[in-house]
């Protein structure tokens, strides 16, 4: 079957596509893939800027020396609250795509990034109270919501067999916003520039992202809010299990992105410039490898990749504890970068698991063909917002753990011990729920479909 014209039948206002069936190979080959890829690239750009704004304060606190009057505990609290807002707004942002359309909401959400950026530009000077910094920092949290709406939108554009790659690329391109803003800050600090210069660079980039979304993106009329799906997803145990696992991967990535520079300055005595030379490396590599995590999950099964990824994260954390106790900066930085890479890899594999899990459950219920695909897409789309929001809360936990560890012990060692224990729990949970043999057998016996379609080990 061939695809209709890209614009479809006009609906309300703007660029709307009325029919979208990516699982139809004829539709996909004719025009679907081209349209999906175009929307993916500009979604990545907008989400990229959103991540930069969300993690803006991880960079700004490096500029804020003694004359700003903030303690290390104040800075960790500030970045924790920014992370918290970014996690919470992911839930409404998920549903905004169906209300406004993917293209329209991308324009709106990109434009909203001007609010925290301009506000930070106005208050960024010595003498501003901590309360003011905290309130303005909270505004930057809306940048975290762009991830949820972008992932929900792109999830609808691609067929199940391509979701791991597409979602991994979309998320990875967004995640790169973290190291990019750190690199820009490094250049500015190295040139003896101030934080307002950094903010001034991003204001026109925000406008550009919104304009490009308006010109090149599309809305899918087939994406609709389903309150029943949201309730069903919230009632499903797998939504919360995957949320917990995503805390371990994405929560680690975003939490370490906010905290790495502060750990280097407070525990190892690095200057802001010295810290900036190092902080971007981990987030950069972690972002670049996220699509690989999705691709590996497509090929070998998300649960398998996620399981062994947690083994690697636990091992890296154990070495970090040793490096922290020995005050070995080269070892500490090297292993921290490895931990960033593993968190990025796990981001891709865990997110790939979500549509696969609900597809497997649909088949296990006896649904087949398009009915099974529709059921899986309905629940996976609804669950992504919740999983993304809860996962981002891991970043809050990491920054609060570092804050308490520095208050109690004067270093981040205590926090790393807690993270090591948490990764052990994530490993056990992944194995028990998605890889334990009785679970695979029970799912396989539920239907006559092929094992690769059903087994949670393959999700």
Image (cartoon, rainbow, N blue to C red):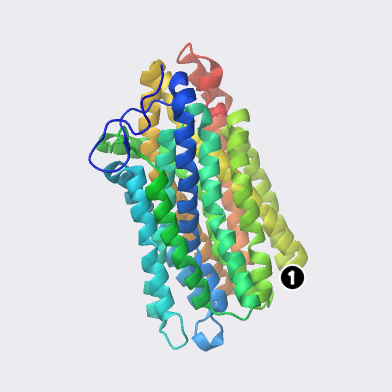
Residue 37, image x, y percentages: 49, 37
- Residue 169: quadrant of the picture: top right
Residue closest to the far top: 448
Is 84 placed left or right of 232 in the picture? right
Residue 154, image x, y percentages: 44, 39
Question: Looking at the image, how many numbered discs can be counted on the residues?
Answer: 1
- Which residue appears at 45% of the width and 80% of the height? 124
- Which residue appears at 62% of the width and 60% of the height? 416
- Residue 3: quadrant of the picture: top left
- Which residue appears at 59% of the width and 41% of the height? 291
Residue closest to the far left: 12
Pick the front one: 458 or 179:
179
- Residue 168: quadrant of the picture: top right
Quadrant (top left/top right/bottom left/bottom right) for the N terminus: top left
Is 70 placed left or right of 184 in the picture? left
SS label for mark 1: loop
Residue 330 in view, yes or no: yes
Residue 410 in view, yes or no: no
- Which residue appears at 29% of the width and 38% of the height? 231
Per the image, the residue denoted by label 1 is 327
Pick the front one: 137 or 439:
137
Pick the front one: 395 or 223:
223
Q: Residues within 10 Å of mark 1 (few under 14, many from 20)?
A: some
Q: Is the residue 213 above or below the residue 364 in the image?
A: below
Residue 402, image x, y percentages: 56, 67
Q: Is the residue 90 above or below the residue 268 in the image?
A: above
Residue 394, image x, y percentages: 49, 55
């Amino acid at each position: 079957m061939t695809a209709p014209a890209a614009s479809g039948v006009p609906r309300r206002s703007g660029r709307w596509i009325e029919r979208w069936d990516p699982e139809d190979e004829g539709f996909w080959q004719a025009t679907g893939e081209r349209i999906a890829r175009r929307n993916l690239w500009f979604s990545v750009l907008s989400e990229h800027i959103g991540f930069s704004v969300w993690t803006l304060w991880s960079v700004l606190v490096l500029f804020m020396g003694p004359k700003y009057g903030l303690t290390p505990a104040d800075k960790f609290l500030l970045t924790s609250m920014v992370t918290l807002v970014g996690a919470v707004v992911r839930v409404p942002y998920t549903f905004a795509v169906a209300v406004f359309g993917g293209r329209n909401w991308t324009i709106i959400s990109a434009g909203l990034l001007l609010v925290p950026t301009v506000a930070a530009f106005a208050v960024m000077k010595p003498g501003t109270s901590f309360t003011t910094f905290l309130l303005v920092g909270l505004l930057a949290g809306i940048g975290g919501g762009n991830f949820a709406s972008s992932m929900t939108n792109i999830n609808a554009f691609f067929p199940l067999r391509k979701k791991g790659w597409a979602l991994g690329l979309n998320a990875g391109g967004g995640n790169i916003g973290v190291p990019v803003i750190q690199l820009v800050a490094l250049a500015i600090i190295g040139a003896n520039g101030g934080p307002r210069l950094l903010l001034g660079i991003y204001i026109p980039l925000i406008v550009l992202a919104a304009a490009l979304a308006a010109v090149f993106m599309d809305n899918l009329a087939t994406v609709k809010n389903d309150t029943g799906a949201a309730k069903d997803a919230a009632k499903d145990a797998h939504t919360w299990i995957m949320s917990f696992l995503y805390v371990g991967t994405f929560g680690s990535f975003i939490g370490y992105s906010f905290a790495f520079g502060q750990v280097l300055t407070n525990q190892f005595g690095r200057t802001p410039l010295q810290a900036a030379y190092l902080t971007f490396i981990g987030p950069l590599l972690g972002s670049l490898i996220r699509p690989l995590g999705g691709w590996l999950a497509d090929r070998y099964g998300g649960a398998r990749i996620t399981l062994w990824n947690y083994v690697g994260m636990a091992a890296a954390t154990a070495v970090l504890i040793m490096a922290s106790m020995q005050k070995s900066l080269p070892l500490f930085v090297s292993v921290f970068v490895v931990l960033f890479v593993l968190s990025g890899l796990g981001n891709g594999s865990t997110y790939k698991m979500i549509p696969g899990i609900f597809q497997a459950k649909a088949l296990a219920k006896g649904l087949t063909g398009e009915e099974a695909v529709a059921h899986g897409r309905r629940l996976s789309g609804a669950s992504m917002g919740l999983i993304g929001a809860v996962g981002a809360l891991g970043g809050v936990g990491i920054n609060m753990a570092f804050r308490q560890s520095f208050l109690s012990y004067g270093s981040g060692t205590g926090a790393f011990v807690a993270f090591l224990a948490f990764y052990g729990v994530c490993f056990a949970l992944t194995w028990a729920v998605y890889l334990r043999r009785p679970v695979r057998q029970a799912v396989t016996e539920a239907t006559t479909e092929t094992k690769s379609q059903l087994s949670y080990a393959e999700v």
